[in-house]
């Protein structure tokens, strides 16, 4: 599966759960390195609401050094940010997370996610 298809499926899952997704489209007027999606999820019966940045990757594609730097910057100011890697639909892996507890609501929506 290509990253665009992965992105479409993730956006649908988030919206189906009542969440809001801002899709960052890189262009010349925007600073480079920002993650692909900003996601805001409402609270569920089990978890509080969740907002954060998610960089999507498929297969062996890696975040660029600038993307990794931006994720660390966001985490340092208290904003959850991570890489969500597709391992094979629907199995995903969350990478570069600052604390597993920060991502429980996201994992609840996505279903089959393993931690790295």
Image: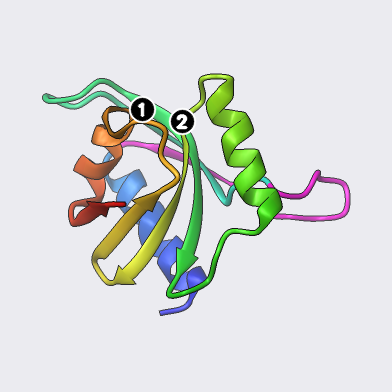
Q: Residue at x 60, y 48 (%)?
A: 68
Within 10 angstroms of label 1, few (less than 14), some, or many (20 or more) residues? some
Using the rendered view, name the quadrant where residue 71 is placed.
top right
Question: Left or right of 116: which side holds 60?
Answer: right
The boundaries of the magenta stretch are 18-33
Q: Is residue 64 above or below residue 49?
A: below
Q: Which of the labelled discs sits on residue 80, or is there none?
A: 2
Residue extending farthest to the bottom is 1
Image quadrant containing the N terminus: bottom left
What is the chief secondary structure element of the magenta stretch? loop
Q: Which of the labelled discs sits on residue 50, or is there none?
A: 1
- Cα–Cα span, label 1 and label 2: 9 Å
Local secondary structure at mark 1: strand
Question: Left or right of 64: which side holds 2?
Answer: left
The x and y percentages for residue 88 are 28, 74
Q: Are marks 1 and 2 in contact (CB under 8 Å)?
A: yes
The x and y percentages for residue 23 are 58, 49
Residue extending farthest to the right is 28
């Amino acid at each position: 599966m290509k990253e665009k298809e992965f992105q479409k499926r993730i956006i649908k899952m988030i919206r189906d759960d009542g969440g809001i997704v801002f899709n960052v489209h890189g262009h010349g007027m925007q600073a480079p390195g920002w993650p692909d999606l900003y996601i805001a999820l409402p609270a569920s019966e089990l978890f509080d609401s969740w907002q954060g940045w998610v960089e999507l990757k498929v297969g062996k594609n890696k975040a660029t050094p600038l993307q990794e730097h931006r994720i660390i910057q966001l985490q340092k100011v208290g904003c959850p940010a991570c890489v969500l890697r597709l391992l094979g639909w629907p199995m995903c892996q969350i990478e570069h997370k600052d604390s597993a507890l920060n991502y429980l609501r996201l994992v609840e929506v996505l279903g089959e996610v393993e931690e790295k």
